[in-house]
Amino acid sequence: MFSDFDRRAMARALALAERGLETAHPNPRVGCIIAQAEDIVGEGWHERAGEPHAEVNALRAAGLKAAGSTAYVTLEPCSHHGRTPPCVDALLAARVARVVFALEDPNPQVSGQGAEALRRAGVAVESGLMAAEAAELNPGFLKRMRCGRPWVRVKLAMSLDGRTALADGTSQWITGPAAREDVQQWRARSSAILTGIGTMLADDPRLDVRLPELPSGRPRPQALRVVLDAGLKTPPAARMLTTGGPILIMTAASAGEREAGFAARRAELVKRGAAVEEVTGTDPDGSRLSLPEVLDRLGRREINELWVEAGARLAGALLREALVDELIVYIAPRLLGPQARPLVEMTELRNLQDAPDFVIVDSCRVGEDLRLRLRPRHH
Ligand SMILES: NC(=O)c1ccc[n+]([C@@H]2O[C@H](COP(=O)([O-])OP(=O)(O)OC[C@H]3O[C@@H](n4cnc5c(N)ncnc54)[C@H](OP(=O)(O)O)[C@@H]3O)[C@@H](O)[C@H]2O)c1
């Protein structure tokens, strides 16, 4: 049984973990509190990979007061040597008496072993306190550890009649400035941003993070920007190539054999700083990249949260293949008419029971627009 203080301490640890929202990648966001009875004597959180974990920062803050204390951690303490030494060792060295953690770490190198190592050394260990809240903070890390793929969050901005662009492709801007500012926050917490060549050619977007500096004053990490471009049509003058962080262009594995100009275009894009990776094409002509393979590859690159800003084709394909974990839909109070482009490309339904179904996780007003967060019902 957990006490009221246990709950307050874990809530504080979760708030601390959130400070690493934009910087902890590819590590999880983790917070830690060290308490003597009901006195908080140390706090810590994990800021960046390669730097001390939350437990180590909290123990440092507590100093000698850590002996005989309870440590509240939002994720099971690690027991293996990663980029930094195991947190279990640090907790034992500080002679912590009790460890309460929210969530077991699904990382196969930790998973239950951290708790076990602590128990073996005589530390009282309890888990499961505010586990759901801790999981919400790290959907990408948890999914990647469990199945090797990132958490896929698709953004869609639509009119009141569910349209995303005019018939000629114009879509800037359907929503107001507050919604676009909100998109910046989602991009900032994502490890990568994915788009399709359709959007790249229509909008020439930057897809970078343009926010004021972090509270710490340290440089803000820029997400990896990924373009699905089977035929390698990305223009060398694209704005994405001259702004923001790294770029990865995923192209069809067979494109090199199909086309004479492919090698030259590839060399030009590489010269301009893009990484080009070949992925299996699923259509007979080699276009349309295998989306499961795209996600597997991004998982191997340690991408936790993937933010998708694409048109009806790519967004539709991800939905059809049941690869979407979350939708963020902005609804602008304006009408674009039936000639305008649909929200997602779908095959015609004959049966209402076959309609993809979502659960609204939350909804709010963002400036003049509405924002819905949804998840597939049968996830
Ligand atoms: N309202 C919004 O939220 C929003 C957001 C972004 C864009 N847009 C608008 O959307 C329009 C562009 O949409 P779009 O549908 O033409 O382009 P898109 O969805 O951005 O990109 C589609 C392209 O991606 C490539 N692709 C590679 N593998 C794929 C796969 N497995 N499935 C689907 N596509 C794959 C295909 O080209 P290859 O086969 O050549 O690779 C495909 O034509 C623009 O007008 C833009 O302004 C609206």
Image (tube, rainbow, N blue to C red):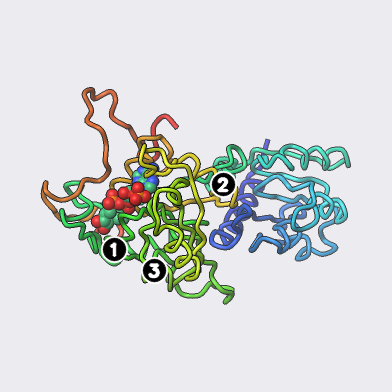
CA separation in Å, label 1 and label 2: 27 Å
The residue singled out by tag 1 in the image is 203
Q: Residue at x 59, y 74 (%)?
A: 218
Q: Which mark is residue 170?
A: none
Q: Quadrant of the C terminus?
A: top left
Mark with earlier residue (1, 2): 1
The residue singled out by tag 2 in the image is 299
- Residue 127 percent location from the top left of the image: 69, 39
Judge: label 1 CB < 8 Å from ligand 1.
yes
**Location of residue 236 (image quadrant):** bottom left
Residue furthest front in the image: 260
Q: Quadrant of the N terminus?
A: top right
CA separation in Å, label 2 and label 3: 27 Å
In the displayed structure image, the side of residue 93 where residue 375 appears, left or right: left
Amino acid under label 1?
Answer: Asp
Q: Which mark is residue 236?
A: 3
CA separation in Å, label 1 and label 3: 15 Å
Amino acid under label 3?
Answer: Pro
